[in-house]
Image (cartoon, grey):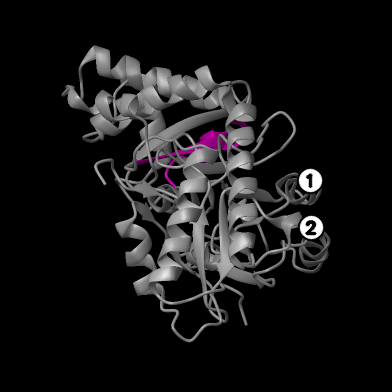
């Protein structure tokens, strides 16, 4: 097959030719033209959440996890106590990095096939006044659960607690309106639903808490307050920026806006999701989650019961047909995941289902019915 393989993953993901071509030019990191691109990207990001009045946005080199770690270290004081609402692998990662940042951290576990509970959070906050901040993963892509951001934010606000949101896999696809939702920090990245390339995260920080963040971070490179202050003063990044990633993101944002912004992006992803669910059901595959709590970002499917099924073989057979799948992230059930995001539409999803059918045929599996 002469085209690039389609990445049915939650990032990196398939990008357009326009986005790829944007990376063919070299940029000086202190050059006025590049600084203008950075400023444009920051302004566009704030517009997506209607956050110009309430928040600032701070870009940071590295993967999205870099920015989650930076947000915790910058926003949570050294003597803070963070409660992580845990219904999946990325929640547990957030808890681990919080602990490594030297902050007190408590996990509040929920079933990985269920949403986190605002009512249970309210009870917990009423019982433990030492908790200062809550971390929520908006779309927990371990299983694909969409967690109730508005309701969790309302509980945190009513109890006077700070909220840090990992919106890595939801930002720019699912609605997030800073005029309605109160959060101290919200983290996303270039290589997800904006359909840029990986290499840059960004953190929205509430203006009301910004000055209190000065001097909190124990890291030089990941101090978001210093990064913000330096950018405001000079228009430049403190340290060598991922120039090609930034200009690719600027081009991806231009296409996002041309498509119709967040509502249009969500509509395309929902169409991809519906096409995927319908096609996979015909092969016998069963989704892991109840549709009521499933985000149209990435879908977890039960592995076939057939003893001939082996994920690595299945993966390679689909890959040879031009589609890259994602392994399962659950601890108790054998699954695999298929992403609905990226610069793809329903026709590509139909082709992916055909490739999966061919992979099953190669393995001698007539039905994908799970245990």
Q: Which region of the structure is painted magenta? A: 200-216
User: Hey, which quadrant is residue 314 in on the image?
Assistant: bottom left
- Is disc 1 in contact with disc 2, using a CB cutoff of under 8 Å? yes
Where residue 3 sits: x, y (%)?
A: 28, 40
Is the C terminus in the top left, top right, bottom left or bottom right quadrant?
Answer: bottom right
Q: Front-most of 312 and 202?
A: 312
Measured along the vertical axis of the image, is residue 241 above or below residue 84?
Answer: above
Where residue 191 sits: x, y (%)?
A: 40, 41
Dot 1, how many residues are within 10 Å of its Cα: few (below 14), some (14-19), or many (20+)? some
Measured along the vertical axis of the image, is residue 293 above or below residue 52?
Answer: below
In magenta segment, residue 208: yes
Tell whether 85 sits left or right of 352: right
In magenta segment, residue 333: no
Q: CA distance from mark 1 to mark 2?
A: 9 Å
The numbered dot on residue 154 is 1
Tell whether 121 sits left or right of 308: right
């Amino acid at each position: 097959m002469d085209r690039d393989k389609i990445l049915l993953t939650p990032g990196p993901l398939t990008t357009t030719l326009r986005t790829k071509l944007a990376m063919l030019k070299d940029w000086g990191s202190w050059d006025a033209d590049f600084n203008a691109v950075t400023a444009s990207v920051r302004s566009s990001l704030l517009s997506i959440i209607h956050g110009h009045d309430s928040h600032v946005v701070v870009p940071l080199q590295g993967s999205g996890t870099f920015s989650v770690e930076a947000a915790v270290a910058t926003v949570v004081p050294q003597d803070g106590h963070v409660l992580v609402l845990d219904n999946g692998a990325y929640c547990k990662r957030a808890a681990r990095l919080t602990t490594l940042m030297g902050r007190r951290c408590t996990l509040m576990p929920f079933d990985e096939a269920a949403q986190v509970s605002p009512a249970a959070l309210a009870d917990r906050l009423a019982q433990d006044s030492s908790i200062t901040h809550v971390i929520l993963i908006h779309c927990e892509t371990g299983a694909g659960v969409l967690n109730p951001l508005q309701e969790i934010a309302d509980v945190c606000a009513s109890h006077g607690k700070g909220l840090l949101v990992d919106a890595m896999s939801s930002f720019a696809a699912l609605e997030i309106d800073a005029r309605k939702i109160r959060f101290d920090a919200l983290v996303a990245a270039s290589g997800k639903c904006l359909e840029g390339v990986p290499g840059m995260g960004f953190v929205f920080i509430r203006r009301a808490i910004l000055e209190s963040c000065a001097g909190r971070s124990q890291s030089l490179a990941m101090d978001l307050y210093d990064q913000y202050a330096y950018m405001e003063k000079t228009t430049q990044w403190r340290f060598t920026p991922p120039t090609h990633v930034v200009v690719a993101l600027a081009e991806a944002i231009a296409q996002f806006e041309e498509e119709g912004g967040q509502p249009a992006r969500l509509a395309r992803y929902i169409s991809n999701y519906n096409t995927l669910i319908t096609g996979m059901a015909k092969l016998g595959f069963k989704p892991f989650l109840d549709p009521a709590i499933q985000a149209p970002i990435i879908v977890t499917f039960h592995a076939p019961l057939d003893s001939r099924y082996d994920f690595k073989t299945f993966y390679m057979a689909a890959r040879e047909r031009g589609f890259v799948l994602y392994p399962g992230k659950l601890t108790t059930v054998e699954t695999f995941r298929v992403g609905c995001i990226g610069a793809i539409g329903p026709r590509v999803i139909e082709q992916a289902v055909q490739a999966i059918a061919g992979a099953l045929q190669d393995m001698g599996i007539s039905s994908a019915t799970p245990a």
